[in-house]
Image (cartoon, rainbow, N blue to C red):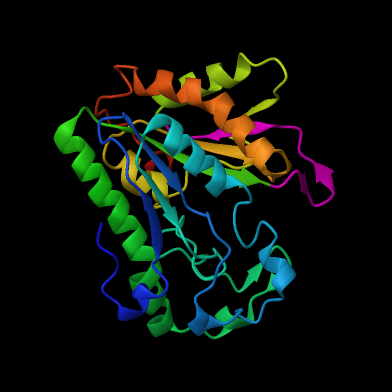
Amino acid sequence: MNQAADPSAIDFPPYEYVTGDPGSGLLLLCDHASNAVPPEYGDLGVPAEQFERHIGYDIGARAVTLELAKRLNAPACLTTYSRLLIDPNRGEDDPTLLMRLSDGAVVPGNAHADQKERERRISRFHKPYHDLIETTLDLSLQSAPPPVVVSIHSFTPVWRGVPRPWHATVLWDSDPRAVRLMLDGLRRQPDLVVGDNEPYDGALKNDTMYRHATRRGLSQVLLELRQDLIANTGGQLEWAGRLEPILREIAQDAECRTIQFFRSRCDAD
């Protein structure tokens, strides 16, 4: 895969790509894999400890994604930069693309980012990641039935003082194919509390899944794992083990491996 054209991408490539079998039936994504910031942006004026929080990245998600890619021999696309720099899981016109305030933390480095700077970050970081996903999907579609797009995220165990009871949740818009199998597979594990479109709604106009799966008619599932369960290597391996057989089942499901268009709830009149 080619890196972005910007020469600075040599020192800080905007994505991480894991080569896998295009015919594996899966494409793994991790939108918020890293809390790093390119040297030219310093720390964005944000204290170091803030980057260790959920506002900086999805804790544990990268390791789970990489382990699943290895076990399933599936291609994977991951970001290399903090969501505080720019959020790859937002459309280019989304007002939260560059956050000035995130969960109570002010981001001074974004406070005066004008349209020119916004466009620079899109060109340098946001667009190359999405171009990578497009290219990977195109290659998969040339050699095999359509893959299922699987996005790995994580969520905080407590929000505004209220504990969240779920161990894992599945977010989705309107396409139920892979979602149904993922929910069934998780719920077969009696020790898990599983959420359905909790604590967030999976319908978001022009987010990663809308852009690459919904608009292409590809089956999809966005998985949220509770961060305290995947914060260390043991938890990451455990959850990769829980998810591996479910994802194998999804990849082998004939209906999931077809192109079917489901109208997004974002586009409903």
- Does 128 sit above or below residue 220? below
Identify the residue at horizontal 29%, vertical 16% (top origin).
Answer: 254
Identify the residue at horizontal 33%, vertical 23% (top origin).
Answer: 256
Q: Quadrant of residue 233?
A: top right
* In-front residue for pair 104/236: 236
Q: Position of residue 177 (x, y in %)?
A: 39, 23
Is residue 161 rendered magenta in the image? Answer: yes
- Does 76 sit above or below residue 167? below
Q: Position of residue 132 (x, y in %)?
A: 30, 55
* In-front residue for pair 132/55: 132
Spot the residue most to the left.
142
- Does 131 sit above or below residue 76? below
Q: Position of residue 230 (x, y in %)?
A: 66, 41
**What span is colored magenta in the figure?**
156-174
Is residue 196 at all visible to an observer of this figure? no
Identify the residue at horizontal 23%, vertical 50% (top origin).
Answer: 135
* In-front residue for pair 77/212: 77
Is residue 172 rendered magenta in the image? Answer: yes
Identify the residue at horizontal 66%, vertical 56% (top origin).
Answer: 54
Locate the C terminus by quadrant: top left
Q: Quadrant of residue 234?
A: top right
Count of numbered tags: 0
* In-front residue for pair 38/86: 38
Is 99 positioned to the left or the right of 145 in the image?
right
- Does 100 sit above or below residue 197? below
Q: Quadrant of residue 167?
A: top right
Is 133 positioned to the left or the right of 198 in the image?
left
Is 201 positioned to the left or the right of 220 in the image?
right
Locate the N terminus by quadrant: bottom left
Is residue 148 at all visible to an observer of this figure? yes
